[in-house]
Amino acid sequence: MIDTASLPVVDVHCHPFLNVGEVTPEQFVDLAAFPGGGVSYMAQAGLPLDEALVREIQHIRRNTVYMRFLIRQMARFFECAPVLEEVVAARNRAVTNDYKGYVRHLFAAGNLIALVADFGYPQPPVSVAAFQEDMPVPVVPIYRIEPLIVELLKADIGWEEFRRRYDETIAAALEQEGYRGLKSIIAYRTGLDISPLSRTSDQGWQALDAVRRGTGGGAMKKLRDHLLCRALELCIEYNVPMQIHTGVGDYEVDVNNCRPTLLMDLLRFPTFRACTVILVHAGYPYCAEAGYMANVLPRVYCDVSEGIPFAGSGARRIYAETLEMAPFSKVVYGSDGLALPELNYIAALLAKQALAVTLNDLVAHNMLSLEEAQEAARLILADTARRLYRLEG
Ligand SMILES: [Zn+2]
């Protein structure tokens, strides 16, 4: 049988958070559940919420397989009854007593050794130093391009200046501020069907001009497509990976334009084949598509975050489907954890459990030897991410 429990884990996609202190059971569920449908998320998005709806949402969000798994596993960690109220009481005591010590225990239990974190969410951003201060493992920051685009659109500047500041800010992030890669959530904005020909500077100039004048349908898409192409070029120049959100996500994602294969035209274009690209969330629920892309495009990788842990029982299928076509050296582990350190821990636990089931099944069917399956587990949980982000050890 494969042993994944003792293997080290690099979390290749998560978000920074600060200590939220003591929480009520309702707040805990809201923070730990998939963010898209939560009360705080909806309030932030300005959606109408009355008291009855809040109570209803709080109630139904306890009823996912994922949430029940989380409560059961956290109860094991605290050696208490698998009841939400008891788990929350135990975690509140631990957090109040010694937050950093509590995080250290959680990470040691999951054997988490590094976090690659997208500091573009939440907004306003958490500082890299503040997050690192609380974490017992190295944090590798990555830079999201969309907040920069928002900032530049607010400035009263023409294309030359826009483009110069875009390049310079990204270059400074990578050269001086310690960021080790870029990230885009263009799937949340204008979708993944991006023409590689958007890379011409003429398209950027024309699109910004149309956005400024409020003319021309689709000008914003043209501008975003151009800027994504430019970000890929900068990733090639600085030899760092680009993370692109694929698949479903929070409330605002463009669900019709988030399938990973929509990126095929862009990523098979000669210029961009040179870029190391991580398909974040392996396009969940279109994981087989993401696996196919990792097969045919030499520098494309799949990260299984979001589906693991939030799809709960789907974790095994996510690994099984991704590994149908993706080389096992091109699948990486991530949690999409945010807000609470418990998420990074639970996701690592679920991933190890699901990966063991998937790999044992392949061994049982004589598709991999035990040694090959062990090697795949090591690569998926840590070693490939170590190589991509140049982590020592
Ligand atoms: Zn994320």
Image (cartoon, grey):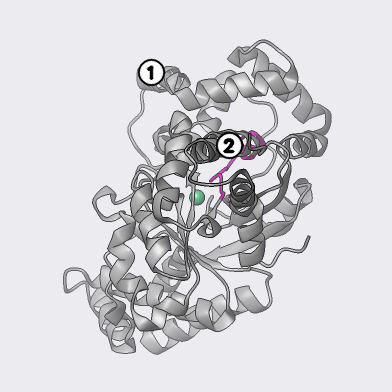
Q: What number is the disc on residue 72?
A: none
| Snapshot quadrant of residue 152 | bottom left
Q: Main secondary structure of the magenta part?
A: loop
Q: Is residue 126 above or below residue 222?
A: above
| Residue 188 in the image, given as x and y percentages of width and height | 35, 55
Left or right: residue 42 versus residue 175 is left
Using the image, determine if residue 279 lies above or below residue 284.
below
Looking at the rendered structure, the secondary structure element under dot 2 is helix
Give x and y (percent) for residue 348: 62, 39
> Marks 1/2: CA distance?
36 Å
Residue 356 disc label: 2
Quadrant in which the C terminus appears = bottom right
Q: Nearer the viewer, mark 1 or mark 2?
A: 2
Q: Residue at x 25, y 84 (%)?
A: 206
Q: Residue furthest front?
A: 366
The range drawn in magenta is 333-344
Residue 34: x %, y % from top left? 46, 35
Looking at the image, residue 389 sits to the left or right of residue 197; the answer is right
Q: Residue at x 49, y 48 (%)?
A: 304
Q: Nearer the viewer, residue 190 or 335?
A: 335
Query: Under tag 1, what secondary structure?
Result: helix
Residue drawn at the location 52% of the way across and 55% of the way down? 328
- Nearer-the-camera pick, 324 or 287: 324
- Packing grade of label 2 (10 A; few <14, some 14-19, many >=20) is many
* Residue picked out by circle 1: 56
The amino acid type found where label 1 is placed reads: Glu
Q: Residue furthest left?
A: 216
Picture quarter containing residue 155?
A: bottom left
Seen from the viewer's position, the closer of residues 41 and 336 is 336
